[in-house]
Image (cartoon, helix red, strand yellow):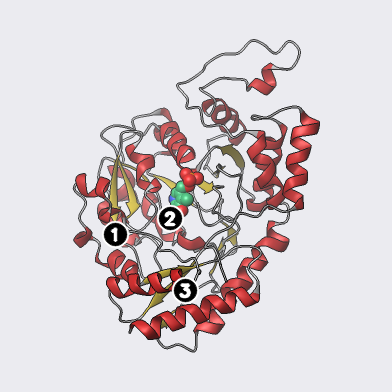
Amino acid sequence: MNIPFSLPLIDTDVINEMHDTLTNTGWLTSGPKVVALEKEVQKLTTAKAVVCVNSWVSGAMLMLRWFGVGSGDEVIVPSYTYCATALACLNIGAKPVMVDVLDDFTIDPSKVKAAITSKTKAVIPVDIAGWPCNYDRINEIVSEPAVKKLFTPCSPNQEKLGRILVLADAAHSIGAFYKAKPVGTLADITVFSLHSVKNVTTGEGGAICLNLPAPFSHDEEYKFLKALSINGQTKSAFEKNQAGGWRYDIIAQGLKVNMPDLCASVGLAQIRKYQSVLLPERRKIFQFYSEHLAKHDWAILPTGETGERVSSFHLYLLRIKNISEKQRDQIIQKVSEKGVGVNVHYIPMPMLTLFKNLGYRMSDYPNTYQLYANEISLPVYNGLTEDKLKVVVETIAEAYYSTI
Ligand SMILES: *Cc1c(COP(=O)(O)O)cnc(C)c1O
């Protein structure tokens, strides 16, 4: 049996929505479907404003630029994440300062605190696998008087906020909760990824949620960010296309990172049934793995929910006790030969050539290495049937016993 690691959901709802876009709206790029998707994300998260863009990384870059982060500035990120978290900083000229993670894969707040300098402008915690990080502690740290005193504003938005920006990398965590609050309302800025492998997808895409304190105006910031995402242009092509709508202005040096309606259609069909159908299905897959792997004393199971946090069940990060990185790789090889797609999330950034060349060293992040070395991600997506899940569990167990 062939079981891919990941498959995007393309069902009749998606096809119908796409068909509607192509045949009824007469519009391909940013227009009514993007606005509808933004409203759905807002409904799901209760965020104060939502701006859709063409990827997580462009959304994060847009928001760092909006905050005036650039050359000479530092942004704190976890060493255990997909490279995009750090690339968002590098791409706008800032330095990613990596810190180690806790045993649940999320950024270690005490390490965040220790890494803060007068150059720190933002911290980007990651809800890895859909598991929310310790938002309360991170928000507390950036508001501590001594930390605020160290903060040296050098842009109007930095003046206005008066402290380090918390920009959540929620690429995995749409629909997750922390202390009964939905992800999207827990940091100043939260960015979801709507990439093909994520829980809700537009093929490529991202959604920025704003949750800024006073005196920021969410209506004004929404308008400004919509412009900033299309070269700083005050009107989209859709708006210019209305009778008499030709005149526009370029109000700031923006990026060209808007989401097309074609992409939004796919996500729109998915997000409408995300909370009622798609997310509960993922949760069941997660629970199936945990129930069936629990009998193996070599399996270290990930946590999906506690009284305090509920995951979006994006990834199932299985770990295996007392094996080396090499043994893990052998197990993966055997599982792959049986046609079961598994993965590793993630190869820590300090192990990747770009970051090694920039001077980051794996030995500085021991917990990250420990978590990575024995980790195997199992397939989680809508449409995975129970007999396939059984095959995944059996294949993993066979590969383990024939390796160890
Ligand atoms: C997928 C992912 C991203 C990047 O998302 P894009 O939409 O492809 O830019 C960023 N961070 C994490 C943790 C991711 O998994």
The relative height of residue 304 versus residue 217 in the rendered view (above or below) is below
Q: Is mark 2 within 8 Å of ligand 1?
A: yes
Instruction: Give the distance between the C-alpha atoms of the residues marked 1 and 2, in whole angstroms.
Output: 14 Å
Residue highlighted by disc 2:
126
Answer yes or no: is residue 168 visible: no
The quadrant the N terminus occupies is bottom right
Using the image, determine if residue 226 lies above or below residue 88. Answer: above
Q: Which residue is mark 3?
A: 302
From the viewer's perspective, is 361 left or right of 141? left
Report if the CB atoms under discs 3 and 1 are less than 8 Å apart: no
Tell me what residue is drawn at x 38 percent, y 31 percent. 68
Q: Residue at x 37, y 84 (%)?
A: 402
Task: Look at label 3 and name its amino acid.
Answer: Pro
**Apparent side of residue 270 relative to residue 158 in the rendered image (left or right):** right
Q: Position of residue 34 (x, y in %)?
A: 66, 36
**How far apart are the two marked residues, 2 and 3, measured between alpha carbons?**
16 Å
Give neighbour class at mark 3: few <14, some 14-19, many 20+ (Cα, 10 Å).
some
Say which element carries label 3: loop
Report which residue position mark 1 lands on.
111
Q: Is residue 303 above or below residue 232?
A: below
Q: Is mark 1 within 8 Å of ligand 1?
A: no
Question: Which mark, by number, is residue 144?
Answer: none
Identify which amino acid the numbered label 2 is placed on. Val
